[in-house]
Image (cartoon, rainbow, N blue to C red):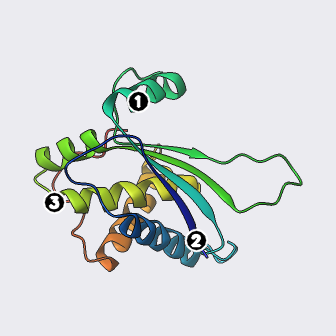
């Protein structure tokens, strides 16, 4: 069973339910498992999602990425020592204010953008990245497929790539 620990460290007018966050993370894990036949059972994993304000995510972005500005989502994959076999994927930190502002700027439904951030961050925890063009194409294609399956529109249609 997928375990998602959700921490609300800020208040916002519109936030997804814990059940929605859980279902979006599970969809990403399940899809990634389908892409990688060597992966373990996707549902036997644990991750945490912390919803924060702009100040907290800016501090984390500065500390861990040397970027002194707020961002939408940060992913912290769990790095366990050899021989420790626990199902921890890691932590996602998502900024409610940045997600809201980006949704408005990109003319998206806010819940659609929330779903994208959870899927995007979860894929990062699983080792996907978008630094190289080929990696970005693979990751964005998988994100689009997952979001389509969840009933959300294409996240990369006619807009700039995500900033983080």
Query: Left or right: 1 with respect to 121?
Result: right
Q: For this view, does 149 lie left or right of residue 111?
A: right
Disc 3 designates what residue?
Answer: 109
Q: Earlier in the sequence, mark 1 or mark 3?
A: 1
Query: Is residue 137 among what the camera can see?
Result: no
Residue named by callout 2: 2
Identify residue for label 1: 56
Residue 40 shows in the view:
yes
- Is residue 163 positioned above or below 124 on the image? above
- Residue 101 falls in image quadrant: top left
Label 2's element? loop
User: In this view of the protein, which residue sits in the foreground, 140 or 97?
Assistant: 97
Residue at image position (52%, 23%) is 63
Please rate how many residues cluster around mark 2, counting C-alpha atoms within 10 Å: few if below 14, some from 14 to 19, many from 20: some
Which mark is in front, 1 or 3? 1
Q: Quadrant of the C terminus?
A: top left
Residue 17 in percent (x, y) is at 33, 64
């Amino acid at each position: 069973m997928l375990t998602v620990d959700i921490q609300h460290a800020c208040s916002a007018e519109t936030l997804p339910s814990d059940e929605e966050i859980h279902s979006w993370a599970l969809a990403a894990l399940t899809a990634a498992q389908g892409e990688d036949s060597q992966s373990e059972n996707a549902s036997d994993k644990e991750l945490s999602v912390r919803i924060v304000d702009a100040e907290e995510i800016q501090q984390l972005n500065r500390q861990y990425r040397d970027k002194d500005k707020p961002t939408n989502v940060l992913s912290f994959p769990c790095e366990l020592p050899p021989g420790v076999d626990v199902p921890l994927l890691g932590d996602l930190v998502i900024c409610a204010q940045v997600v809201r502002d980006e949704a408005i700027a990109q003319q998206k439904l806010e819940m659609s953008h929330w779903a994208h951030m959870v899927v995007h961050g979860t894929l990062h925890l699983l080792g996907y990245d978008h630094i190289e063009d080929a990696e970005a194409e693979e990751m964005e294609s998988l994100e689009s497929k997952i979001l389509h399956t969840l009933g959300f529109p294409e996240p990369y249609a006619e807009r700039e790539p995500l900033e983080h």
